[in-house]
Every structure is written in structure tokens, then in C-alpha cells.
Amino acid sequence: MTVQVWTHCDIATLQAGHAQPYGLVADAALVVEGGQIAWVGPRSQLPAGLAARCTREHDAGGALVTPGLIDCHTHLVYGGDRAHEFELRLQGATYEDIARAGGGISSTVKATRAASEEELEAQSRKRLQALLAEGVTTLEIKSGYGLALAHERKALRVARALGRSQPVEVRTTFLGAHALPPEFAGRQDAYVDEVIRMLPLLHAEGLVDAVDAFCERIAFSTAQTERVFQAAQALGLRVKLHAEQLSDSGGAELAARYGALSCDHLEWLSEQGAAAMAQAGSVAVLLPGAFYFLRETKLPPVQLLRSHQVPMAISTDCNPGSSPCTSLLLMLNMACTLFRLTPEEALAGVTRHAAQALGLSDRGEIAAGQRADFVLWDVAHPAQLAYAFGANPRLQTVFKGEPV
Ligand code: DI6
Ligand code: FE
């Protein structure tokens, strides 16, 4: 087996509990064997026996190395776009007005249903490639624009196919309870029954890694969300929730009771919600792109999350309605400028805490035993990744030990 070593680099390991900010190791060496990290530390301390076994040496040219970036909340697979609604909102309509008038998510449902699997994959691949160009090595993709068995299946199959054809690992989430499809107008509970019927069928086809719902006054109630969670639990699937984005519905407390991997958005999160998340070990996924694009003014309670020691992740929420964004680096910047995270918190939010939000313990840090997913950057200090916006200083991505 080839043993590879990278030298002439500084490494932001992001290891939890490391003595240095960002888990920084200066003048480091990184040894990779069989797609996994075998050793990381100061080059001067590289064991001679291990150095002798290295068959491939990479000069990183003074780059900064971080873990591969993880985008833990996306709706990347969809048809069409919603630029027209953007125009309407600029004329004064709100996101909720448009949703209530039958636009919003419903218009993307129409376009997604109309697209063939091939068309959907071609459109979605472009968005994925933009994320990969910035060093993303793992991402989550939700369904939720099909809202009928055949179309939810189509979207999830596209998500899986993208993961097979691109150097990235895709984790899929079934978001059948995203919006009410037109054929169920006025019959919300009947549609929740349908969601519960779809879930085991899609799961049996290997298309579902986790289950999500949109718990909101314009979407599904906590009681309806709970029925979806029970169906997930019966299949042994982990849950997550779009919670307290536009109002405080108590979704975070409900999700915590089901041991949710994460609660996402959270602008309206209450103190009880934060406490419940802390106790359940749920990650808070903050989505500055949606906050920015909808011109929200209510900030997520970052200080509350810190004081309850709830880990914070950051994601693009890539979707056509509230965050048509394919830049996770821009989200790093916005998490700092808009939400006042520190650059170190933001970087942990797209690495270690994003991995936790997906229930993945084998990535998100650079440490022995972790997957060898990492990125070489043309920056001198990790804070520069959050500081410069619109820049892309990526030099190279290494995915499962292979330079891509
Ligand atoms: N919250 C969001 O921000 C996205 N979905 C959700 O539940 C928006 C989806 C859309 O507008 O298409
Ligand atoms: Fe979302």
C-alpha cells in the first residue's frame, strides 16, 4: 500500500481540545495510508520508521491545510430557478406572502417534477461543482421538491448518482415534509400519511440516510412533524429539523426529544430550545445565506448557543428560494459578519461540527484514524478563509487520500 506524506505546510487540524487555536500545527507533516490519516504533527517529530515507509512525497509549497469542507444542509437537487420571486420580493412581497400565494417551494416542485432524471442531474451537477471548487468533500442533499414518491425517488437517485460521479461523499436526507403538494391542498394530515408511506419504500431502496421536516406556520406543525419522526425512528433513521426559522414553533425541543442530529436555521430559538438541544447533543446548523437573502433581522441566538455549549455548524442551505448560494467560503464570512461567530468557530462549523451534524465521526478533523479528506489553501493563516469574501484560495483537494 502506498504511504504518502505531505510536508512544507501548516495544518489547521481543527482537533477538539487542541492547545492551539484552530488546532494549528506549524511546519507539519501529514502521513496518509490507505485513504486514512496515519499520522499528523510537527515535521521534526515524524517517527523515522514511518518516514522510511513513505513512498510518495508531496511538497505542499507552504500551503495551509484544513480538513475537507463539509456542507451539512443543502437542497442542491432541484429544477428551475426563482429569480422572478426575487424580483417580486424586491418590489415588497415577503417570502411568506409568495409561499401563501402558491409560489415559493411549490413553483420549484413544479419545475422539479417536470425535469427528467438526466436534466435534474445536469442542472444539479453545476451547483455541486461550484461547491467542490471551494474544497467541499462531503455534502448533504435533501429531497423535498418532488413531494410524490416517483419525484422524491428521482431527486434522491440524482443525489446518489452525483456522489458516485464526483469526488465527494453525498449524504441524503428525505424531506418529504417540506411543503404541501397541490394535489393535497387542504389535506395536510393526509399528506403526512403519504410521507410516512413513502419513507420506508425509499429507505428500502437505499436512498435515505436521515429524515428532515420543515416545522413552521407555513409548513408542518409540531404534531405532524412528530408523526414523521416516529416513522423515522421505527426504521432506525436519525432525524433533523428545519426549526424556528420564521417563528418559534417549539420545533427544536421536539427534535431534541427524538435525539436529532441537528436543528437548523434557529433564528427564533428559545432558551428552553437551546437547553434541550444541549442535552440531546444536537448540533445547531446556522444558515447565514438564508438570513441574508430573505433580509431577516432576527439573529440566531449565538450567545445562548455558546452558553449552553451547543456545537454550531455553518452551511449554504443551497436552495432556489431562500439561499441560491453555492459558496461555503462566503458562508464562513457571513457567519462572522452577520452572526458574529469568530473565524475559528466558523471554520469548525464547516468541518468538525458539520461532520457531527451528519452523524459522521470519521471526518471533520485532521487526526490519525480520520478519513484523508483535506484541502491545501494559498493562505498564511486560517482566519483568512473567513476574512476574504469572493476569494477562492483553494490550491488542491485531497479526497480519501487521492489528490483530485
Ligand atoms: N427552509 C428554507 O430556507 C428552504 N426550505 C426550508 O424549509 C427554502 C426552500 C425554498 O424556498 O425553496
Ligand atoms: Fe433548508
Image (tube, helix red, strand yellow):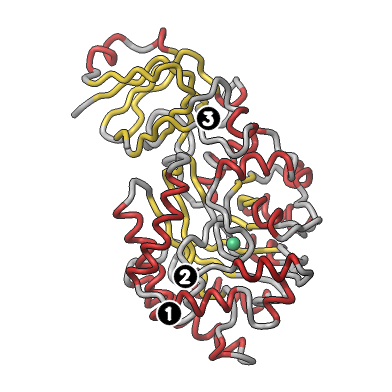
The three-letter amino acid code for the residue at tag 3 is Gln
Q: Is mark 3 within 8 Å of ligand 2?
A: no
Which residue is under mark 2?
79
- Whether pointer 2 and pointer 1 mark residues with C-beta atoms closer than 8 Å, the reply is yes
Q: Is mark 2 within 8 Å of ligand 1?
A: no
| Residue pictured at 55% horizontal, 55% vertical | 261
| Left or right placement of residue 369 versus residue 304 in this view | left
Judge by depth and name the residue closer to the eye, 222 or 64.
Answer: 64
Which residue is under mark 1?
114
- Whether pointer 3 and pointer 2 mark residues with C-beta atoms closer than 8 Å, the reply is no
Please state, as top left, top right, bottom left or bottom right, where the N terminus lies in the image: top left
Where is 86 relative to 192, above or below?
above
Query: Count of labels shown?
Result: 3
The image quarter containing residue 222 is bottom right
Where is 364 relative to 153, above or below?
above
- Whether pointer 3 and pointer 1 mark residues with C-beta atoms closer than 8 Å, the reply is no
The three-letter amino acid code for the residue at tag 2 is Gly
Q: CA distance from mark 3 to mark 1?
A: 45 Å
| Residue pictured at 47% horizontal, 70% vertical | 79
Q: Position of residue 203 (x, y in %)?
A: 38, 70
Mark 3 Cα shell of 10 Å, populated few (<14), some (14-19), many (≥20): some
Say whether disc 2 or disc 1 marks the residue closer to the N-terminus: 2
Where is 172 relative to 289, above or below?
below
Judge by depth and name the residue closer to the eye, 271 or 81.
Answer: 81
Q: Position of residue 176 (x, y in %)?
A: 51, 75
Q: CA distance from mark 3 to mark 2?
A: 38 Å
Judge by depth and name the residue closer to the eye, 186 or 251.
Answer: 186
